[in-house]
Amino acid sequence: MTTELLLPFKLNSTIELKNRILMAPLTRCMADENLVPNQAMVEYYARRAEAGLIISEATIIRPDAQGYPNTPGLFTSEQIQGWQKVTDAVHANGGKIFAQLWHVGRVAHPHFFDGEVLAPSAIGIEGSVPRMRELTYQTPKAATSEDIQSLIADYAKAAENAVEAGFDGVEIHGANGYLIDQFLHYAANEREDEYGQTPENMSRFALDVVDAVISAIGTDKTALRLSPGAYFNMSEDNRDKAVFDYLLAQLNTRQLAYLHGGIFDDSMRFASLEDMTTSEYLRANYSGTLVGVGSYSFESAKDAIEENRFDLIAIGRPFIANPDYVSRISQGKELVAYDDAMLAELI
Ligand code: FNR
Ligand code: 8K6
């Protein structure tokens, strides 16, 4: 089957992808007790090297970034060495892989680390940790200016560690209600300093992190994921759009490797985004390479790319069910249907 989706795509002058299909970042909670990737993870990623680019499962930048069991890290030498095995195996199979850098902010739980839960403001979320329902979420501490500076530095350090571990680049996780996204939405950010109140101030943390990561590893290796519409651990506020309008205008001057929407179903329309979908809104406001995602099939992704609604597609759940997703669609073979039960092991 010949389609643009299966042909090479240049992200920039240093990174060329062999096709336009990305494996979406997928948390699997399978790292060892020191949050080091294990051998099953090495093989799991290596099996998916046919993707134009693999985005790793979200990987925490420091201990207080953790909100789920056994999520891998990128802040100890053991973790870097563990990831090196993953990146070596992906590269040996002809693939490319970015690390997704994560801090969950108020979705963290002190069960996993010593210390406080940090967020832009002291506004908690309802509920408890998946798979560990006895751990209810706490009201976070509003980060001080010093906390903010150390968080920014730790994103940059984790990006350096990612490159040391052999990753081809990083995707900063700015989506899905986690730390960076918490600064970008009024429902989670009531700060009265230079990180709150106005679109410019509310965008500052995201831009500081992006700029620190660019300084650390270069713009060609730096990508970002954003959820302009609030849908997960976050409530919508009609003022949010102005924040993202400002942020995207600033990002247009940065030449990131790509921008990736963070959404489970891209047919979802947001009242706060004037009834647009995630990809419609991002395409209208962002001029660089855009990755679409969210319940796409190969056919619907092909149509979207042909219609220029975005440039690359990220595939999540179908990649869990089909390690050989790219071969199957190239050969017109049927896909195995995804089922949540598949999350129990790495196939
Ligand atoms: C996800 N998703 C996700 N997103 C992210 O930015 N970092 C992550 O670590 C995860 N983890 C994760 C785990 C599991 C089990 C699922 C199902 C999803 C969201 C994911 O990247 C993607 O946006 C959605 O799955 C929608 O794409 P599909 O699955 O419809 O192709
Ligand atoms: C136990 C593993 C934890 C994985 C965390 C990351 C992703 C969770 C996947 C399920 C979330 C579904 C959210 C969908 C929200 C739609 C709201 C309309």
Image (spheres, rainbow, N blue to C red):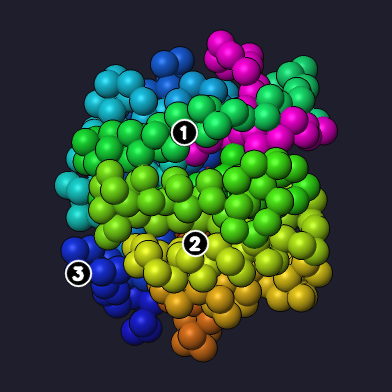
Q: Residue at x 72, y 55 (%)?
A: 230
95 falls in the magenta region: no
The region drawn magenta spans 102-126
Residue 126 is left or right of residue 157, and the answer is: right
N-terminal of the pair, mark 2 or mark 3, is: 3
Residue 133 can be seen in this image: no
Amino acid type shown at disc 1? Gln
Residue 313 is left or right of residue 181, and the answer is: left
In three-dimensional space, the C-alpha distance between marks 2 and 1, rounded to whole angstroms, equals 25 Å
In terms of secondary structure, where does tag 3 sit?
Answer: loop
> Which one is nearer the viewer's eye here, 273 or 51?
273
**Residue named by callout 1:** 149
In three-dimensional space, the C-alpha distance between marks 2 and 3, rounded to whole angstroms, equals 19 Å
Dot 3 crowding, Cα within 10 Å, few <14, some 14–19, many 20+: few
Amino acid type shown at disc 2? His
**Residue named by callout 3:** 13
**Residue named by callout 2:** 260
Quadrant of res 143: top right
Quadrant of res 132: top right
112 falls in the magenta region: yes
Residue 262 is left or right of residue 11, and the answer is: right
Cβ of mark 2 under 8 Å from ligand 1: the answer is: yes
x and y percentages locating residue 206 in the rendered image: 51, 50
x and y percentages locating residue 12 in the rendered image: 26, 69
